Structure formats: structure tokens, C-alpha cells
Image (cartoon, grey):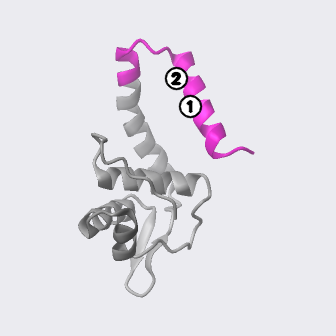
Amino acid sequence: MFITIDFNSDEAIYIQLRNQIIIGIAVSHFKEGDNLPSVRDLADNIGINMHTVNKAYTILKQEGYLKLDRRKGAVIAVDIDKMKAKLQLEDEMRVIIAKAICKNITCQEAHEIVTKIFEEYSPD
């Protein structure tokens, strides 16, 4: 598993880890049923505290990306509740769009950014 942590970033390490795992799922580096490294192994490999990895895994579980199993550890289990996911996306995008408007980014420019990102993650 290839995870890069920017220790100089203002973004919390557990958020960086969470985001990279979500992106890994989006670009099919991780698939439904794949096991992630144990908390201890991932913490040792990256050089971070085990509690930080545990926090990222817990958030991913709460958000419907992982299930935690005592025997198998952290397993990719993407929640298939599309309507719930769409509502959550809409809530998150409200703030992002408000930020864009504050910075004078047009609707067209925002659409171009969204299209570019979708193409990066799903080059069908």
C-alpha cells in the first residue's frame, strides 16, 4: 500500500490517511473486500502513531468505506446506499461551492474542475 504523509501540512495526519484511502478506492487501488494493513503495520510503515491510524480507520468505517473485523482487520466495504451518499455529497459541496463563490470561481470553472477530477478517477 502506497501512502504518503506530508508532515509539514496543516491537514491532520489522520485526515491525510483517510483521504488517500478514499482516493485509492476511487481509482481502484483498493477494491471491495480488500484487506488494509493492520493498524500496527501501517503505523510502523508510515512512521506514525497507531492511534492516528486507528482514528482514520474508525472515520472510514463511520463513513461507510470500511468494516472492521477482529479476524480480518480493516476490509474495504463501500456502502452501497447511493441516496444517502448523494445527500452527504450535496451537503459537503455546499461549503465547497460557497468557498468557490467567495473566490470568484464561476460555475463553468467549477464544472471543469469536477469533470477533470472524474476523468482522473475513472478514465473510461
Q: Residue at x 44, y 67 (%)?
A: 66
Horizontal relation, residue 45 to residue 109: left or right:
left
Q: Secondary structure at mark 2?
A: helix
Per the rendered image, the range of residues in magenta is: 99-124
Picture disc at residue 68 = none
Query: Which residue is denoted by mark 2 in the rendering?
Result: 110
* Pointers 1 and 2 in contact (C-beta within 8 Å): yes
Horizontal relation, residue 42 to residue 109: left or right:
left
Q: Is residue 34 above or below residue 78?
A: below
Residue 108, horizontal then vertical, whole percent: 57, 17
Residue type highlighted by circle 1: Val
Residue 104, horizontal then vertical, whole percent: 41, 11
Q: Residue at x 51, y 51 (%)?
A: 23
Q: CA distance from mark 1 to mark 2?
A: 6 Å
Horizontal relation, residue 16 to residue 52: left or right:
right
Query: Which residue is denoted by mark 1 in the rendering?
Result: 114
* Mark 2 neighbour class, 10 Å CA radius: few under 14, some 14 to 19, many 20 or more: some
